[in-house]
Amino acid sequence: MGFANLINSWTVLFPIAVLLYYFFRKKYEVKTISSTMFWEQSMRETKVSPYLKNLQKNALFYLQMATLLLLLFILLAPFMIKEEAIHGQTIVVMDTSASMLVEKDGLSLFDKHKEAIKKMVTERSGQPITIVSTGKEPMTVIREEKNAEEVLSAINQLEVSYEHEFMERAIEFAQSIAADSEVDIHIFTDSLNQQVLPEANDTMAWTVNASDLNYRNVSIDKFGAVATPDGTEAIIKLLNRTEKNIDGNIILLDPITKTTLVKDAFMVEGEQELLLSFKDLPTSLALTASILVDDDYAADNEAHISLGNETTHAIIDNQLHELIKKAFEAVGLSVSTGSKNELTAAMDDSIVVTNDAAYLLSGTKPIILIGRNDENPEEVTGVISTKSDSLFSIADLSNVYVSEIYPAFDEFQTIAMIGNKPFIQKSSRGDIIILADVEMTDWPLHASFPLFIWSAIEQVGAEGNAIGTFTPNERKAVLSSGQSGIEVFTVDDEYVTSFTDTSSFIAPQLPGVYKARAEAANEKIFTVQLEHEELDLKTGSSYRIGKAISGEGTVENKWMFGKYFILPVLLLLLMEWEVQRRRGYPH
Amino acid sequence: MTEELIPNQLLNRLGALSISTKSGRLGHHKGTHRSRKTGSSLEFSDFREYHLGDDLRHIDWNVYARTGQPFIKQFLDEQEMRIHIVLDSTKSMQVEGKWDYARQLCAGLGHIALKSGDTVSVSTRIHGQNRLIRKKGILQRAAITKFLSSIEEPNSESGFTDNLFGHIPKAVTVLFLVTDGLEETDNWEHLFKRLRGICNDVRVILVQSKSEELPSFEGDVRLVDIENEDSVEVTMTNRSICQYIEAKEIHEGKLFALSKKYGIQIIHGHVHVGVMTLLTKKMRQIGWLE
């Protein structure tokens, strides 16, 4: 303990003055009388134990003395140096994945951990606390905050983000925050293998708070649906992760029209899986499967799928340059090369890339035409100018040099020109025509080439109504034809979020079926689905590695507690008043 | 003080007084008080018919001559009274002239009684032992005074009411208790209950000093009880004095109520008023003396 205001110690004069006053106060005169019988009766309360009698006799003195000393004490501003086992900052890594929603006794693991963190924060009030939430991109919720109330309110605002925790990233992130300073890292999750943690050293202590409760869980492990000429076929794989048999009901729902397509009872044996398939379902844009079972984890009892005809395969004419194949591979498509016959065969379920203009007229799907085999190129000079099109939203062509181009198709819309000649055209069907061979330009050497290819695939391949399936918070560029950006709505047309830049699209975190609206007329369905890892509930024990950090070189925390003595002083003053009132003024 | 406990000229002023009582119980010896029984005094009482066995000497022959019937002439009997005085010798009697006052009172009462030819006994307790003097006849006045003078200081440790019975003689006509009455009323009740069986005419004189009546202390005083050395610290204020008087009045009120219940008379004897006033005025007014 120390005193911050030692200068105020001169006030010790006041208690001394009171003390002196009591030294020189009048003494009692002794008188012998026949009997104190009547006097005793009027002062009966004085006849107690000698100590109490002394206290009672000098009550006013003691009270005044106590008041003065307390006031003196407060004036000196006393403080305590709080010695803690661990100094330096505390980093809390909070798992925000969907599996934290598992409930036992009406309290989710997430809330349970939140309470534990709050308790810890209250205990470490005044120390810097950093809270990190997990995910593909770990984030600091609050950084080196010393004010416990701020931290508590930040904890209250923590929410489950549904995406997988990627605990390794969070741990690396926490380590990078900690740098070389002493730090006590607390991880709140459902289960964490000790091998994931780095080796404990002198400056880091790791505490893992896991849950070792036994949870019952039945999950929709896989959910697939495909549109056939006869309707829609759906297949659902249920997995029972508990030892007991569990029965329940399965419901298949069209989330857009809100019609229940199938309702069926099922029973899954313990630790077994169950395959359910449904045929001849009506055609719909999306399907939602949900199971009604009595288990502890509700988040995986629902699965969504959108029935878009997304194409993920490209077939490239073997007449084309190898660079084109490379470019298609670079954007993540499965690519094959083939002859004209193979191209024709694969036309319906692949993106066809060719230089044969005949394909513009055949097949049901748009193609990408690079160069023309039916015309001869002519020289061209000039700067490339592009029209507003989503194809160029991420690919900038301004630095591209083109030596020769083929003649244009008259009936198609030109979206890029060199000088006054068309360079890139678009057909009404959606075909993309590049009027130059790869050899005629340095474009493949530019970064904009694969980006353009990607955009082209997005536009050609995803010409349907769906833009695919996302995981919660997944960051993925989505192509939109308009420049207005994308607005995201739920199937019930509730506004969720919007993105001005289509390349910065981030999927919503809550699993479900959503609509992405680029323009009023252009509405596409996409679904957000939990990662497969999140379907499996892992449990593990809590442990701690790394020693408690020694007190050396720690920050001393001064706890000013003087203010807490003001109330007792007030109380003492009241008591003095009362004593004075009862005793009356001495002669 | 030993010599002048009570001056003789003052005692002489008491000559005309005698103790009056309605108590029928008198002593067996000859005295000056008329008894209800017939006896051998000169005062005529009554005639009655002669019955066999009566003393022939008492036949009034004059009446026999007139009536032819033998009548016995009866006279009133005169008998002595037995007066006993118990003097409270507890330490509390030391204070403020109460002891002298009490002894003077005893001497005065003794003087009056002896002059009437009554038997007087005085008892008190000194150094834990009972002292008793018993005298009869006017010539014994000096002996009583001397006895009282010889007791320098009251120093009895035990309470007054506790040791009273050991030295009260039998067949007491009038019993005087000279005390300051500073004991719990329970003790007094116990005493009064037993006194009723011993004497029909018990008279208590409560000796009280001036400052006991109205405390004259000022300032902060530690009051020490002379008997048990308890001390009480009191800051003298009107309020505390009022409380004292109130407590005292309650105590005396209880005492008077008790005495009324058991047929015992109590009066106050105030030290500052003096013994003579008490004897010649107050006691005569209430009919103790005549």
Image (tube, helix red, strand yellow):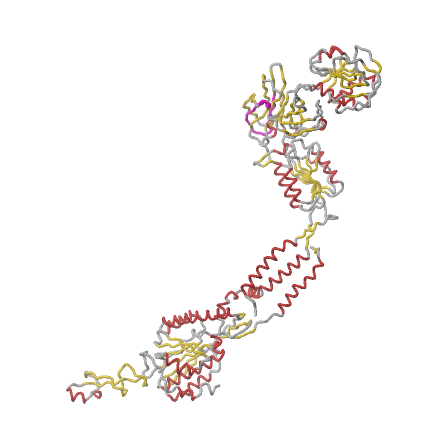
Question: Can the viewer see residue A420?
Answer: yes
Quarter of the picture holding the N terminus of chain A = bottom right
Image coords of residue B259 (percent x, y): 38, 72
Question: Can the viewer see residue A195?
Answer: no
Q: Is residue B219 above or below residue A315?
A: below
Q: Is the stretch drawn in magenta largely helix, strand or loop? A: strand
Q: Is residue A568 above or below residue A518?
A: below
Image coords of residue B199 (percent x, y): 35, 76
Image coords of residue B15 (percent x, y): 38, 87
Q: Is residue A67 above or below residue B217?
A: above
Marks counted in the figure total 0
Which residue is more in the foreground, B19 or A554?
B19
Which residue is more in the foreground, B261 or A259?
A259
Kindly indicate the quadrant of the structure image that contains residue B110: bottom left
Q: Residue at x 60, y 64 (%)?
A: A61
Q: Residue furthest left?
A: B68
Q: Residue at x 58, y 61 (%)?
A: A576
Tell whether position A57 is magenta. Answer: no
Image coords of residue A530 (percent x, y): 64, 28
Tell whether position A247 is magenta. Answer: yes
Quarter of the picture holding the C terminus of chain A = bottom right
Q: Residue furthest front?
A: A420
Kindly indicate the quadrant of the structure image that contains residue A50: bottom right
The magenta segment is: A235-257
